[in-house]
Image (cartoon, helix red, strand yellow):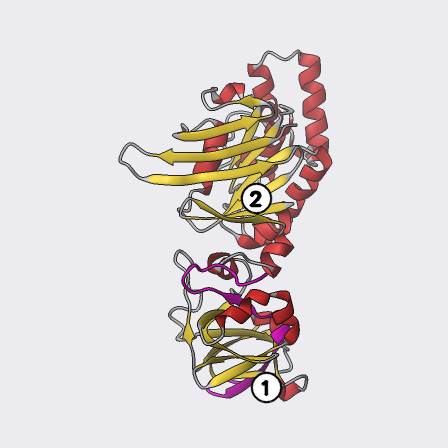
Amino acid sequence: MARIQLDKLDKVYDNGFQSIHDLDLDVADGEFLVLVGPSGCGKSTALRMIAGLESITGGTLRIGDVVVNDLPSKDRDIAMVFQSYALYPHLTVRENIAFPLRLRKVPKAEIKRRVDDAVKLLELEDYVDRKPANLSGGQRQRVAMGRAIVRQPAAFLMDEPLSNLDAKLRVQMRSEIAKLQRSLKVTTVYVTHDQVEAMTMGDRVAVLSRGTLQQVDTPQNLYDRPDNLFVAAFIGSPQMNLLEGTFQLDGDSAKVHFGSQWLNVPAAVLDAAPRLRTYAGAQVGVGIRPETMHDTALGGDNSSTIRGIVELREGLGSEIVVHMRVDASSVRPADVDDLSEGLGSLFVARVDPRSKVRIGDEIELGVATDLLHFFDLETTLAIRD
C-alpha cells in the first residue's frame, strides 16, 4: 500500500492544449478516492499520469516516498483496471489471472496460492476453466479485478471499470468493488463520470471540471456544502435547481426574491453564513435541491412556497419527479449539462407519490428554507462563513 501525492500536476499536449491545471491531490494510504466529472474534464488523463501512461508536463507525482515523474509504468507498483476488461481471449480465467505473475517469473507454488485466493475472494471458483467469451460482463470484470489483485500492488487505478455493464449489474459490481477495496485496504483511485457511483463508493470524491479541481471532500460534505456552482449542479440527482435572486435584509429578517416570488431566509441560515448579510440588495445564486420540497396540497409547512406550471410528471413509484416552469431566471454553470434541457422545464422537485398533480396544473411547493444554498454570481463560490 502507498500514499499517492499529486503536487501541482500539469498536462500540456504538443498542440498547446492544457488538459490538467495545477492538480493537487493527496490520496492517503488505503484510501478509496474517486475522480469524477463530465466527459472531457481530464479525470482519465490524471489517472493515466499516475499510471505512467501519460507524461507529466509540470509538477511532482509521488507514490509512497518516491518521485515517479519519469519512472516507467512497470516500475510504479500499480495495477490498472480498464472498462474494456483487456482479457486474453485464448486464455482461461485461471490463466488470465495468473498472467502478470508468470511475466514476473513468480514461483509456480506462489502463483497457485495467489490465484486460488483471488478466485475465492471474487467467487469465480465455478468459472476458472472458462474463456472470456463464455463469461458475462460482470464475470469478465471480476477476472480483470483478479488479475490486478494477484499482483499485490501498492495501488489500484480503475478507469470507468463499470461503463460497459448494464444498469442492474453496475449497481451490484460497484458494491462488490467497494467491499473488496475495504477488505484489501489497498490505496485506490477510481475514475467515473457517474456521480452516483462516486457518491456511493468513495471515501472521498474529487470533482474536476475542465482539468481543474473544484472540490475534494467526503460524499456527504459535497452534497451538503458544495464549494461553488459547478459542484452544486453536478452533485445530486436530479441536479440542484439554481435560480438568480435578489437578497433583501431587514434587520434580522431576510428574504430572497426571484421573479414575482420570494422565500424567507431563516435566521439560522444567516447565523451559519454571516457573510450573506453583505449581499443585501445584490443578486445572488440560490440553490434548492429537488428533495427539499413538498406538495403543499398534501399538508406540511407552507410558510415559504414556490409556484409553477407542471410541464412533465415522472412517476417512479416511491416518488414523483415534477418538472415545472417558474417565474425566475436560472443559473447554468459552464460544463454542466442542463438535465431538463429540451423538456421546457426550469425547476425540478421530488414529491410524495400521493400527489395528484398533473401536466398543466399549477403546483405549490413548500420549501425547506433552512437548506437553501447561496452563491456569488461573479466568483461562482458558495456564500458561507
Residue in the image at 69% along x and 30% along y:
119
Provide the residue designation for mark 1. 356
Find the magenta span and give its range. Answer: 357-385
Residue 364 located within the stretch drawn in magenta: yes
Residue in the image at 42% along x and 49% along y:
39
**Residue 181 coordinates in the image, percent (x, y):** 67, 38
Residue in the image at 52% along x and 30% along y:
87
> In terms of depth relative to the viewer, which is nearer, 20 or 82?
20
The correct choice, above or below, for 207 with respect to 256 in the image is above
> In terms of depth relative to the viewer, which is nearer, 260 or 70?
260
Residue 209 as seen in the image, left or right of residue 91 = left
**Residue 21 coordinates in the image, percent (x, y):** 41, 40
Disc nearest the viewer among 1 and 2? 2
Asked if residue 130 shows in the view, the reply is: no
The correct choice, above or below, for 161 with respect to 91 in the image is below
Give the residue type that dot 2 points to: Val
Residue in the image at 66% along x and 84% along y:
301
Provide the residue designation for mark 2. 34
Q: Residue furthest left?
A: 15
Q: Secondary structure at mark 1?
A: loop
